[in-house]
């Protein structure tokens, strides 16, 4: 079957291209074409993530240093949180993904190679090649008028009645669901969520659905803590004015929390969590840290025998996250604070970097 197109597509489009730290340019690029198994969408909305800000500010973890290999392959069209309308389907793509022209769709943030050890074991989110939209040369992102989902991508249809602004939250909220799952929350647990950005607030919402005894949200922003209450937090703590470790111990008869999910990206939160956990508790690390973290590892082993688990991306979480948003089980309106045109992408990055009065900042091509 030949390529199907919804309309006659333009030859060029606007795209926000990352060239280097603090060097993001709105450029004219060729509109991508759909080859066999590929999907082209007209972008309806795209989010700005904390990892985008770290790339913008030149964090070593994304550009490379003596400790870590550089990750951002500039020049590259940025953006890994997006939702779009299908405007072209390459041969076989419609049948493979259950998509038709005019459908609203998104693609998981990683395009696996499907050949490495991890992909063959079903751990596609740990793919050795690790092509992530907006960072890697093979996968230009969604800060553009149009984008392509390559062959082998994991694509999902989104209900047309869902607002595109809400659908743009699916990627970070899927990550939140994966972080929650990694915590192994049980009925009656005391769960602490450190960091109430978009992912952290998503963790609050998903954790509450696990019927714990308490969900404790921790953040430096009182506004974000109020948003956490709207999503189900039973307690809120602000480290600026409260001793988080003492407060958590006080509410747990001196033992500490059962599960601590770290999504701040701040080294101080790691030590805070280790001290706040009871013995044999579970500590989930889901942050993208700017720098290495040092702490007393004796706490983990000899003192508390903690279960330390990592969390990365959102494997097998997209369908249920789409359902949670579509059903209203998660109030998407809690998350969005700014909507900007594509040409204001750098302004959006600066707003998120400042972190004073923003949560989810969206770009609308």
Image (cartoon, rainbow, N blue to C red):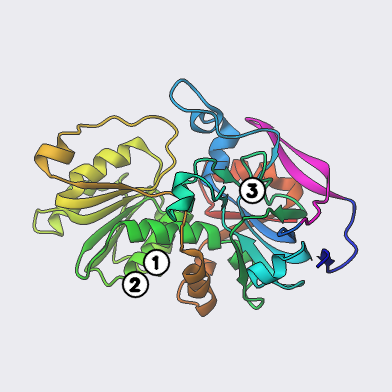
Q: CA distance from mark 2 to mark 3?
A: 30 Å
The relative height of residue 224 versus residue 295 in the rendered view (above or below) is below
Q: Is residue 20 magenta?
A: yes
Find residue 344 and report its horizontal and vertical position in percent: 72, 46
Check residue 209 in the rendering and tell me which mark sits there, or answer none: 2
Residue at 41% across / 50% down in the picture? 221
Given contact means CB atoms under 8 Å apart, are the residues at marks 3 and 1 in contact?
A: no
Q: Is residue 227 left or right of residue 326?
A: left
Find residue 94 and report its horizontal and vertical position in percent: 71, 69
Which quarter of the figure is the N terminus placed in? bottom right
Which residue of the protein is positioned furthest toward the top in this rendering?
A: 66
Residue at 67% across / 48% down in the picture? 141
For marks 2 and 3 on the same chain, the one whose residue lies earlier in the sequence? 3
Which residue is labeled 1 in the image?
205
Check residue 167 in the rendering and tell me which mark sits there, or answer none: none
Query: Where is residue 149, by image quadrant?
Result: bottom right
Q: CA distance from mark 1 to mark 2?
A: 7 Å
Look at discs 3 and 1 and give the one toward the viewer: 3
Q: Is residue 322 left or right of residue 212?
A: right
Residue at 29% across / 57% down in the picture? 183
Given contact means CB atoms under 8 Å apart, are the residues at marks 1 and 2 in contact?
A: yes
Find residue 174 and report its horizontal and vertical position in percent: 48, 61
Boundaries of the magenta span = 12-35
Find residue 230 and report its horizontal and vertical position in percent: 41, 69
Q: Is residue 297 left or right of residue 322?
A: left
Looking at the magenta stretch, what is its main secondary structure? strand
Which one is in front, 272 or 188?
188
Query: Where is residue 299, by image quadrant?
Result: top left
Which residue is labeled 3 in the image?
79
Secondary-structure class at tag 1: helix
Q: CA distance from mark 3 to mark 1?
A: 24 Å
């Amino acid at each position: 079957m030949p390529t199907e197109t919804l309309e006659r597509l333009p030859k060029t489009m606007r795209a926000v291209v990352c060239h280097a730290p603090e060097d993001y340019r709105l450029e004219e690029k060729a509109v991508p074409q759909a080859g066999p198994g590929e999907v082209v969408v007209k972008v309806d909305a795209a989010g700005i993530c904390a990892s985008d800000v770290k790339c913008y500010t030149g964090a070593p973890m994304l550009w490379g240093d003596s400790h870590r290999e550089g990750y951002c392959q500039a020049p590259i069209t940025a953006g890994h949180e997006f939702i779009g309308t299908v405007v072209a389907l390459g041969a076989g793509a419609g049948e493979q993904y259950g998509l038709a022209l005019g459908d609203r769709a998104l693609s998981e943030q990683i395009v696996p190679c499907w050949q490495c050890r991890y992909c063959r074991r079903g751990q596609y989110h740990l793919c050795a090649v690790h092509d992530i939209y907006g960072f890697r040369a093979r996968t230009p992102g969604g800060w553009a008028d149009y984008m392509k989902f390559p062959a082998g991508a994991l694509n999902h249809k989104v209900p047309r009645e869902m607002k595109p602004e809400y659908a743009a939250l699916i990627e970070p909220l899927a990550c939140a669901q994966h972080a929650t799952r990694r915590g192994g929350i049980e009925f009656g647990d005391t769960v602490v969520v450190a960091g109430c950005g978009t992912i952290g607030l998503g963790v609050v919402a998903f954790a509450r659905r696990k019927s714990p005894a308490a969900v404790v949200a921790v953040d430096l922003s009182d506004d974000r803590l109020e948003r956490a209450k709207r999503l189900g937090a039973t307690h809120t703590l602000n480290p600026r004015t409260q001793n988080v470790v003492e407060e958590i111990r006080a509410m747990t008869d001196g033992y500490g929390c059962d599960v601590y999910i770290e999504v701040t990206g701040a080294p101080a939160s790691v030590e805070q969590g280790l001290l706040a956990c009871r013995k044999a508790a579970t500590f989930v690390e889901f942050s993208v840290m700017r720098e290495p973290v040092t702490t007393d590892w004796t706490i983990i082993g000899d003192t508390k025998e903690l279960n330390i688990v990592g969390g990365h991306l959102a494997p097998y979480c997209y369908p249920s996250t789409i359902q949670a948003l579509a059903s209203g089980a998660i109030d998407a309106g809690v998350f969005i604070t700014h909507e900007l045109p594509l040409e204001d992408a750098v302004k959006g990055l600066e707003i998120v970097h400042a972190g004073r009065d923003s949560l989810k900042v969206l770009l609308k091509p």
